[in-house]
Image: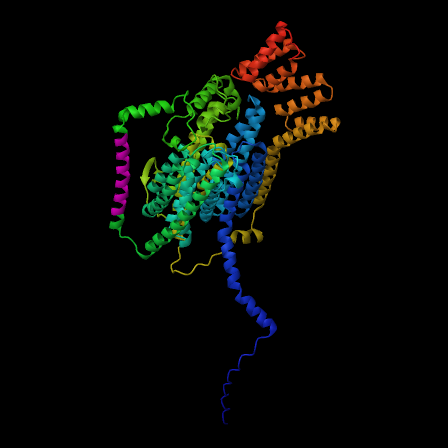
Amino acid sequence: MPSAPAPIAAAPAPPAPPSGAQSLRSRSGASTPLRAGLAGLAWQAGPTLLVATVLCLTTFIAGGGLQLGPSTNTEIALTLGAGLTIAAAIMLTPRGRPLSGAWAAILMLLFTALTAISVGWSVTPDVSWQEAARLLAYSAVFIAAVAVARAAPRRFDAVLGGIVIAAVVICVYALLTKVFPAQLDPSDPYARLREPYGYWNATGLAAAMGIIACLWLGAKRSGHALLGVLAYPACGLAMVTLMMAYSRGSVAVAVVGVAVWLAIVPLRLRGAALLLAAGACAGGVVAFAFSNSVLSSENVALAARQSAGGQLGALLLAMVVVLLALGIAIRFAAGRRTLSPATRRRAGVVLLGAVVVALIAGVGGLAASHRGLTGTISHDFSKLTNPNATLPSNTPGRLESVGSVRARYWKQAIQVFEAHPALGAGAGGYATARLRVRTEGEGLTVRHAHGYIVQTLADLGLVGLALTLALMVAWMVAAGRATHPFNRRWSKWRWRSIELPYTPERIGLLSMLSLVVAFALHSLEDWTWYVPGTAVTALICAGWLAGRGSIEATAARRGREQPTMARPRRERPTPAFRRLLGGRVSTLQAGAALAVVATALLAAWTEWQPLRSNESSQEALALLSSNRGAALRVARAAVSEDPLSAEALFRLAVVEQSIGEPAKARATLQRAVERQPANPAAWLTLGEYDLGRHPHAALGELKAALYLDPQSTTVQNEYVLALRANSGSTGTGST
């Protein structure tokens, strides 16, 4: 039977034109890579911009941290934001991950608790409560950084990138106050840069930390080359800001921080290239600013400042352009040619030799001075520790001066500590307790001891210092596990050498460590711990280092998980969110997250009370002219909102006196004295009230105020009036 013929293969039909729906799908599919690229960009840049935004808002809203309203608003925002961040990190962190940084977080909370309970013995319990609110916000930020480092340890670059952006914004704004003085700061009498903090040493510290962050950005091998190029003008702007702030402490910690970075990060040639290029260009701008009497003198007319500001702006713009060109050239040369190990060693020797020559030249200059080397050192040390030293001028010459009034503040803090050795005078109590021991003729209003250690001794005594030292040790242990800056670790009671690769993450963590060291050293000789903008920057880095955990364990785990064949790895930006949406969050995690959010809300409400009371008191005074009954109700509400506040009681007494209830007004002022018996302001206010009504009582009250603040001219004058009233001098009894 004949077989059937083989079927003839049909020719492929020409493709039909796409229908409308198909065409739409095709166009939509074509945009998928674009969408994916935008999503990836948002995933990469979003956290960096978020960190920069938080730091900038903290800086520009809180300023120097001295105003109750801006500080409280910042603290509430930080507490709520950190609470939500901690809650999200709890739910997104894989179960079983080590609980790194727990001891540091616990000790931070214990220190905050000690600050809060110090209201029980504080000379100014209302101020102590405000300090506790500040520490609540700081603790929330620190713990949030710990939690995020555990949940997303590879996003370290977002922290450092955000610090670079924030430093550039801060430095540019500070410089613009000199470039455009009429628009940004027309009434500033000083030559020093002090905005946006209102405090030049904080501005200098922000610039110093920015230089360290720029070192990381400009020297790192990973990431886009353009970002490394941008580090050059950013570092130049930070250097100019640092010098024009005339902050000796900030210059010193910048040098130390950079030295630490160069010592522990093996990218010294790249870092040196950045520092030399930025330093050379910034040096020219600084030389112009220092030599221009309009820019370097105080109380200069606005018209002259505007003219000189235009010249400064042109130089700054030229510096940015030149540093961009240098950055491109240096990065291009580094990308085209890899230096041999021998060349690197020779370059390192040359750089080290230059440093040694500079040190020898400095020592030689001191030896050639008329006092000699030892004589100059002894003389400068004597000036540094002299409590009777005078304030140096706010001109570039202060950078060459050693004398300072800090020794006076430190001596007073030690005297306050000696009077209250165990628990101190209460958090924030130094400002009031020092009035008893301040020197004759000292009219400066000083709120801080200009040094973290002496401030802690005065405020919280030996207990506070012990907690601080325990916190420092716990943090150093946790940060050491994450960085191993000396390439060693403790093993069987021996400090053994280890070999760990300098991955991009480890270099980033070491850069954070250098930044924290710079901030810590600066806090030893200034009160920048109380400036939210600088403190939050350091707390984020410190918390990240504490929460990151052991990089040894991570490296070993990645080695075990290394696939046998190399294959392209597709980035999955949000696996944690998919796990969350997939319902793989335990009940314990969800409960802990809810508890954190509830605690953050309670903490924010607590932080709000002093500001709420202050606003109510001011409202009560404003209502006196229109509605006295409402004024009395609001004034009483202010006292209940912050029962620790002496100011709320003072304003309530004013309202009671105005509505014709002098007996109640006097009783209210007596309550203020009972609540703050070591506060001279309470005795002075009561004594002034009684001076025209009860001269004998006023004499005792003003005598107590004079004992607590013997150098106050106001108290002295009122006490003299009380003496005359009690002696029956003519015309003085009704004063």
Residue 140 visible here: yes
Camera-nearest residue between 111 and 640: 640
Asked if 718 appears above or below 148 in the picture, the reply is: above
Q: Quadrant of the C terminus?
A: top right
Q: Is residue 599 on the magenta stretch?
A: no
Residue 588 sits in which quadrant?
top right
In the picture provided, is 96 more to the left or to the right than 583? left
Q: Where in the figure is residue 500, as x and y percent of width and height?
A: 35, 46
The magenta segment is 346-365
Asked if 640 appears above or below 481 in the picture, the reply is: above
Q: Where in the figure is residue 574, as x and y percent of width and height?
A: 52, 53
Q: Where in the figure is residue 414, as x and y percent of width and height?
A: 45, 21
Q: Where in the figure is residue 57, as x and y percent of width and height?
A: 54, 42
Residue 512 visible here: no
Q: Is residue 353 on the magenta stretch?
A: yes
Camera-nearest residue between 559 and 143: 143
